[in-house]
Amino acid sequence: MRRLALLSTTVLLLVFALPGLAFAQEGPSTADLSLAMDTMWVIIAACLVLFMQAGFAMLEVGFSRMKNVGSVVAKILVNLAIAALLFWAVGFALAFGTGNAIIGTQGWFLAVSPGQVNDVYAGLSWTQVPLSAKFLFQVAFCAVSLAIVWGTMLERTKFAVYVVFAIVFAGLIYPMVGHWIWGGGWLTELGMQDFAGSTVVHLSGAMAALAGTLLLGPRLGKYDDDGRPVNIPGHNMPLAVLGVLILWIGWWGFNPGSTMAAVPDIADIALTTNLAAAAGVLGAMSMSYMYRRNVDVGMGGNGAIAALVAITAPCAFVAPWASIVIGFFAGVIMYATLVYVDKIGVDDPLGAIAAHGMGGIWGTLSCGLFTSPALAAVGEPGLFYGGGLYQLGIQALGIVAAGGFVFIASLAVFATLKATIGIRVKPEQELDGLDIHEHGVFGYPDLVATDYQNGNGKISEPMESVPEGSA
């Protein structure tokens, strides 16, 4: 009986142990699980960044007039489509492909064998996720930068201009800046700090926007006969604020996702990102109260966007207290810039130059001021930590080089388009609205169509001049 009991016990132990042994032999290794988690995080982050297109759409729709909201949606869709295809074909290779100090020279169409990925795309060899995940995350960034361009050019730009410029921007201009700073180019070698793109993404988009706006000119009715700015209000503030909130949430993929790995650091980066945005709201609203003696809702949203732009470069390099300082002053700088730009005759309906341009400049410089020695994975500590002026100088050099290149290249493209197909719709088309003339439909057919038929679908009457728009 004792032998029978022992035999039965042994058999039962084997029955329960064998599946465990088989799983241990055939199940995923720790390295496999790590790779799977990293890949999943990068895809989630890419989804959050891609969803920022919805934020841009709501923001622009809210700050446009009813007669132009359909053109905003059409522009968002076509630009996202072009960015996805052009960045896949050539842009990703130019940005991250192995090449020289100026541009990548290999890796077209993602056509590379798995064993050669790190050799062909040396600019992203530091992350272990699959090539497709790397591309999906980076193409979402390219689409964000392109979306920024059009914030200054709403309500008067020909649709064909969006298409042509998107091809050049996504296929050449943006990738070149990306290679310089992120892809192993000359600014990479100098140690420039731009963790998630204050310069690469936001300043690039803003400088292209400035070039286009200068050639395009202000909207009809934006300035009175004496040259004083006139407010042209958007039609839906709740939609604009919804856009800001979508962008705010999307930034939690934008900044933490730039680790391209599921590491504990993503929580700290999300924290600095959120603190900066909150401080930016207060900074902009404080300026609004000081300037106008009221609290402007649009300026609050604008402040959040400017702060998010500013913290994008230093989010992984600075302590939480520094992110609050960076965010607050981003809101202040944005407001002052928006007032100044409005007065000198540059019509920027969404404040993209102020929020993405000056926010990008301030955020990039702030790395040279606030980067902590314990967090300086790239470059040197900031000036306020005893790091001296070297890093601040590198940051300034990167701003001048990248911003200057994008502005000159974009100006050349827009000037060529202006001399050939033209970049601005006819005055009567602008007065009636782009929806009916460019797309044949109204965004609000029950409301705008009636006004159009009655001859009332024209430009707003001049109102008291106040800063307008949101990033």
Image: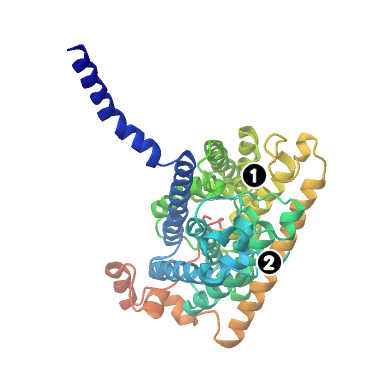
Q: Nearer the viewer, residue 149 or 45?
A: 45
Residue underneath mark 2: 99
Residue that numbered label 1 is attached to: 314
Asked if 231 appears above or below 286 in the picture, the reply is below
The alpha-carbon separation of the residues under discs 2 and 1 comes to: 27 Å
Does residue 27 appear to the left or right of 318 in the view shown? Answer: left
x and y percent of residue 189 in the render?
75, 55
User: Residue pushed farthest top?
Assistant: 2
| Residue in view at x 27 percent, y 24 percent | 13
Q: Position of residue 112 (x, y in %)?
A: 53, 66
- How many numbered discs, if any? 2
Q: Is residue 17 left or right of residue 222?
A: left
In this rendering, position of residue 279 left or right of residue 433:
right
At which x and y percent is residue 465? 56, 59
Label drawn at residue 437: none
Identify which amino acid the numbered label 2 is placed on: Gly
Q: Do callouts 2 and 1 mark residues in contact (Cβ within 8 Å)?
A: no
Quadrant for the N terminus, please: top left
Q: In this rendering, does residue 409 appear at all?
A: yes
